[in-house]
Amino acid sequence: MQNTDLKTIAAQRKSEIKRYIDDVKQFIPPETITGDMLNSIKQRLLLLATHKNLFNAETFPVREGDGTSSLYLLSEESDHTSALYVVSELKGNMSPPHNHTTWAVIVGIEGEEINKFYKFSSPPNDNGKAKIQEYASTTVAAGNGITLMPDDIHSIHCLTESPTVNFHFYGKSIEHLPNRKAFNMQLGTYKTFPANPHIYK
Ligand SMILES: [Fe+2]
């Protein structure tokens, strides 16, 4: 593609991201968010995901040396709220069950990502113990998505041969969420879940 075409597409991408952020601001309250508000955000993010010429695995690849996933921060406010990412994954990428300590909306652009959801059978205690059990799962792909409240627990599993690309939109950027927990279902333990180190801005 010519340089001028790439510049035009980059300008369109920037403009669509700004329109998205401007539109969803009305749904984001300063304090507690509700499931209905998250659903409204999800509907708007699904619209953004239809711009496949702007958001795709070619533009946002898993970068060499990153293993099975790379994150691209597209937008955030100056206080790191309303953080929008493109997350690219390859087959085999997975996360342990974890919470986010902020709300989250995930929407598919291409490929497929299995999301499993968990509930506590024994909540976290100060000794690093917590028991969880899976209660549901769904596949995030183009045209659908999920919403998560700050305490909700999920894990992700990318099992498809073709690249998977999703939007992740968080109440706060994951680099500023130091208290996220990752759970070990077999051992009945938890520990701090650090941010993915492969984030591009
Ligand atoms: Fe997550």
Image (cartoon, rainbow, N blue to C red):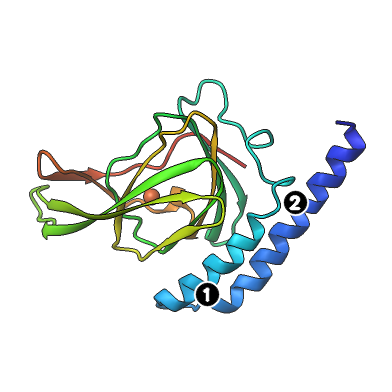
Which quadrant of the figure has residue 194?
Answer: top left
Assign a secondary structure to mark 2.
Answer: helix
Label 2 beta carbon less than 8 Å to ligand 1: no
Q: Looking at the image, is mark 2 or mark 1 nearer the viewer?
A: 2
Quarter of the figure that contains the C terminus: top right
Residue at 55% from the left image edge and 30% from the top image edge: 62
What amino acid is labelled 2 in the image?
Arg
Query: What mark, if any, has residue 128 been given in the picture?
Result: none
Can you give x and y, in whole percent of width and height, for residue 17 in the image?
Answer: 69, 58
Neighbours of disc 1 within 10 Å: few (<14), some (14-19), many (20+) = some
Give coordinates of residue 58: x percent, y percent: 67, 33
**Residue 77 or residue 198, whichever sits in front:** 198
Between discs 2 and 1, the one toward the N terminus: 2
Q: Residue at x 86, y 42 (%)?
A: 7
The residue that label 2 is drawn on is: 13
Left or right: 111, with 153 as reference point: right
Q: What residue would you read off at disc 1?
A: 28
Percent position (x, y) of residue 46? 59, 61
x%, y% of residue 72? Answer: 58, 42
Give the image quarter of residue 191.
top left
| Three-letter code for the amino acid on which mark 1 is drawn | Ile
Mark 1 lies within 8 Å of ligand 1 (Cβ measured): no
Judge from the rendering whether residue 6 lies leftward or rightward of residue 109; answer left or right: right
Q: Secondary structure at mark 1?
A: loop
For the N terminus, the image quarter is top right
